[in-house]
Image (cartoon, rainbow, N blue to C red):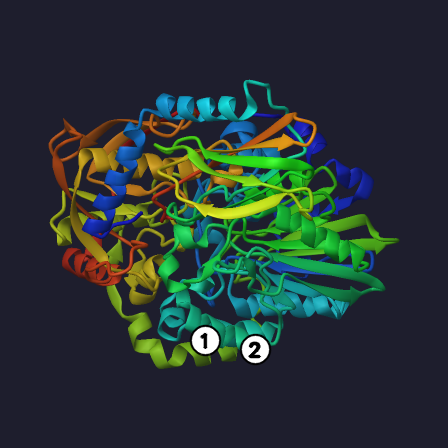
Amino acid sequence: MEFTRRGAMAVGAGLAAALMLPARGAMAAADDKIAEFTGGAAAGSGGITLTTPEIAENGNTVPIEVDAPGAVSIMVLAGGNPTPEVCTFNFGPLAGAQRGSTRIRLAGTQDVIAVAKMADGSFVQASNTVKVTIGGCGG
Amino acid sequence: MISRRDFLQATVAASAIVGASGVGNWARLAAQQTLSQDQLLQFDTFGNVTLVHVTDIHAQLKPVYFREPEINLGVGAVNGLPPHVTGQDFLKLFNLTPGSPEAYALSYVDFVALAKGYGKMGGLDRVATVLNAIRADRPDALLLDGGDTWHGSYTCFKTGGQDMVNVMNALKPDAMTSHWEFTLGIDRLTEIVDGLPFPFLGANIFDAEWDEPAYEPYKIFERGGAKIAVIGQAFPYMPIANPGWMFPGLSFGVREERMNQVVQEVRDAGADLVVVLSHNGFDVDRKMAAQVPGIDVILTGHTHDALPEPVLVGETMLIASGSNGKFVTRLDLDVRDGRMMGFRHKLIPIFSDVIAPDTQVAALIDEQRAPHKAELEEVLGTTDSLLYRRGNFNGTWDDLICNALIDEREADIALSPGFRWGPSLLPGDPITREDLFNATSMTYPAAYRSEMTGETLKIIIEDVADNLFNPDPYYQQGGDMVRVGGMGYHIDVSKPQGSRITNMTLLKTGEAIEPSKTYVVSGWASVNEGTEGPAIWDVVESYIKRMGTVHVDPNKSVQVTGA
């Protein structure tokens, strides 16, 4: 639990705002971005590893890493943020690894999605739920 | 509820293949009502390696009463699986005789009557006697401490954990991992860790800025001709469940990939046996055991479960050794040719009236307590109700704390965190300052008083409920539900976050909680820096002194469905 008055109110308000987000709208925006990236091609699974915390220690700066050997480009999306695009990593032919890591801000509990474009033009996708919680009360 | 037969096949039946557990023997002795120290310690030494596990002692140097939970719900795949089995179901599952010592030690059934007969459990001087006996059989037994050791009592609080460090060092652990230790604050923690004669392990503790390992991940021991790797896994949700500002710069998490790497690393280094000394919590460990190949034994902690037999997940054995010094697990293993070939296990109950204290450790404990004797022993009042904490939704200790918060802080609603530590008191017992600190001791005790809307209250309660009842264990934090005074609610644990809680009612008026209306709320143990208010123990002490004798009515204000 978080409970100075200011803290509790601020966090409560933040979560309330998150809950009131038009979740379907945000996910639809993410889906649009994915369709734009893949040109509508279906994305497979496997060959891409997305590493995120299960529960964010701080929703304002959540470390993520994505690794897709053989990718030429990897797009990262925060499905529940008002603006879902996070970044796109592009890898040239001399890149030693096709891996990128960054820290992102999450408006609330949501799916983080990574889509990789492989050298042969196919796509693979991975998605993890990251929980943004008030915290406290752990045992 | 699965039958014992199914359970055995799913979990311990492997005892037929690989080993045996001590509970059957223990049950027979109990039936004869002839419990003796020799019988409690009886163990036919087996194999070439002995592991001894203690965990979640919560600074209980002396014997205590500790009532095991009445309600301990499992959601999703673990519904009805140990440790989510309580009371009579637990006794049936493990074939324990009602009224026997092990029924008293492991379940809540007839707790008060049995407590009067069988007495208190634990005491690190008794634990020392058990260790001496094990080491007489197997001098190089490994003693592994699962953490939550340097937290939870008056003397531990006053000495910054030094009393526990002094006594545990006398027991000579070979390694430990951690959780509440970090709430001493990073400076004090570092001071202690730098002086420890054994490693303080945490493979999942990272420097937050550079994302690099911050503590030793593992230690490899040579025992009985085998290489034993002990990997530490600290509580994954440290900066979320406890105040992150007390240990800035550290990041935790389950970090399954990291565990995979470390297991591979120790295997590559020639480990014949891989042991994870974990503070994940039982369900998180059960998932991790299924996800990460190559772990032979997980010594579980955090969720305070005591199971008389190991639980097997694939080829990984999960051991649950209880809390508060009530139990010591002895696990003998036959480790040959890079693998575990067999085991013998016993959850040894520390009946304080049966096991003689080790005189040296008893003297050392007295030495830690002597400077605080007067404060510890001061009687604040009496309870005419059983006071306990453990259970998913409420405990009478927290009902008492909530009553005190509402009364002393003039609040409509009180919130008390769902901690799993805190020993029990029997009806008629005096409440001493030591008892009060056993239920409240911590480094962030301020009892705040603030205003919250009904909507905010619902968000908070939904959030905590998801930390307990999310069907994916990796999203659980391992505490019990926040305790609520002055307000009732209905919870359907099977629903997703946001729709579990309904019928929130202000008890004093019987009216529904209105989302837009503001209520005065008092609580304690905020994880926010700068929280203001008197220490919770001062609030409760004032209340107990005013009441003289405290009485706690059965709490029927939380209705539970969906389990």
How far across and down, in percent of the image, does residue B315 sit?
74, 41
Q: In this view, which residue lies farthest toward the right? A: B337
Q: Is residue B448 above or below residue B183?
A: above
Tell me which corner region of the image, top left, top right, bottom left or bottom right, holds residue B28. top right
Residue annotated with mark 1: B162
Relative to residue B76, is residue B210 depicted above or below?
A: below
| Discs 1 and 2 carry the same chain letter | yes
Q: Is residue B264 above or below residue A46?
A: below
Residue B415 visible within the image: yes
* Residue B442: % across, % down: 35, 62
* Coordinates of residue B516 in the picture (x, y in percent): 14, 31
Mark 2, residue position: B359
**SS type, badge 1:** helix
Residue B62 higher or lower than A127, as above or below? below
**Residue at position x 51%, y 51% from top?**
B236
The residue sitting at 57% across, 58% down in the picture is B146
Amino acid beneath label 1: Gln
Q: Quadrant of residue B59?
A: bottom left
Q: Amino acid at mark 2?
A: Thr
Is B293 on the left or on the right of B533, as rendered? Answer: right
